[in-house]
Amino acid sequence: MHSKAQFRESFLSEVHKDGFLVILAYNFGDHMMSIERNLIITVLKLTKNGVASHGLVKRESRIPDCFAEKLLHILQNQGLVYVGRDYIEVDSYNRLKLAVRAIGLGADSEVVSSFLQWKEFEAIVALILEANGYLVTRNLRFKHAGRRWEIDIIACKKPIAICIDCKHWHHGISPSTLKTVVKEQIERAKAFADSLPSPNIRTECVTWNELQIVPAILSLVASNLKFLENVPVVPILQLQDFLTQLPAYGYSLKHFSVTSGHFKNRLSRKP
């Protein structure tokens, strides 16, 4: 994730075109960053269920109208918001980008993520996966070993099936908590592998002759670890890069292999 200094540099690179904002940025320094943060949080809050009134955004952000107008203009130039005559609109993907940006500017991650719809987060993930040629099943439920299981997203592209646990609140999580999250996802992936073949599981990859099932954690923002127990922990804005690099990882990731001949599952050896 970008550092505060990087956000400041990005901000200044935009405002140099406007003499009024240049003076404010250099005189008020970090205070301008907090103004931008407050505006973004307000936009996220008010666009959670659709478009927001232009005037309401300016009032609830509690910053001077001149600041709000200039910052909204910058965000629009960066393609993050659309500012109409009397309304502001933000699509789901840009709401996620704004959320990550607000956290980078020092906003509390739990407050920011509370303004994101859970289905909104999953829908964006599904769109990115589908754009990369994956067949996507969301909220897959199945029974195995006397238990009910649910996997947020299964993304299939021969011979790989990625079992994804979406954690859109995931920021600053302790190593012990992350270890628990990863352990639980490994258990879900193994249960999925062990349940095959099953006519009751409706996802395309169950009919394949060979299947490599990979557990993964997808987060809103970056954690300190990119892998834990060989399970990838991927920030959503780095999902595209991860998918591009995935073939290069080969069998080094934690995975379960299933073959149609005997449907015997084995946990891969640790690299």
Image: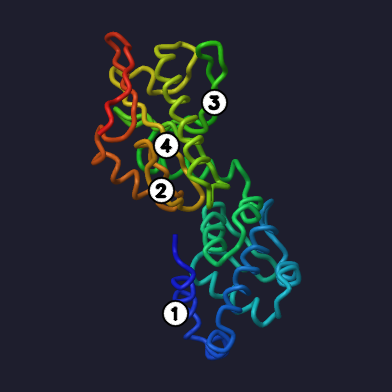
Say what secondary structure mark 1 lies in. helix
* Between discs 2 and 1, the one toward the N terminus: 1
* Between discs 4 and 2, the one toward the N terminus: 4
The Cα atoms of the two marked residues, 1 and 4, are separated by 36 Å
Query: On residue 225, which mark appears?
Result: 2
* Foreground tag (2 vs 1): 2
Query: On residue 216, which mark appears?
Result: 4
The Cα atoms of the two marked residues, 3 and 4, are separated by 14 Å
Query: Residue 47: percent from the left, percent from the top?
Result: 67, 57
Tell me if mark 3 has few (under 14), some (14-19) or many (20+) residues whose alpha carbon lies within 10 angstroms of its own.
Answer: some
The Cα atoms of the two marked residues, 2 and 1, are separated by 31 Å
Say what secondary structure mark 4 lies in. strand
The Cα atoms of the two marked residues, 3 and 2, are separated by 25 Å
* Between discs 1 and 3, the one toward the N terminus: 1
- Name the residue rendered at 49%, 70% in the picture: 4
In the displayed structure, 152 sits above or below 238; it is: above
Query: Where the C terminus falls, by quadrant?
Result: top left
Are the two marked residues, 3 and 2, in contact with CB atoms closer than 8 angstroms? no
Using the image as rendered, state which of residue 124 and residue 99 is in the foreground. Answer: 99
Query: Residue 78: percent from the left, percent from the top?
Result: 48, 69
Query: On residue 13, which mark appears?
Result: 1
User: Identity of the amino acid at label 2?
Assistant: Leu
Query: Residue 203: percent from the left, percent from the top?
Result: 44, 23
- Name the residue rendered at 76%, 71% in the picture: 59
The Cα atoms of the two marked residues, 1 and 3, are separated by 45 Å
In the displayed structure, 69 sits above or below 191; it is: below
Are the two marked residues, 1 and 3, in contact with CB atoms closer than 8 angstroms? no
In the displayed structure, 112 sits above or below 106; it is: above
User: Identity of the amino acid at label 4?
Assistant: Ala
* Between discs 1 and 4, the one toward the N terminus: 1
User: Identity of the amino acid at label 3?
Assistant: Glu
Q: Is residue 194 left or right of residue 108?
A: left
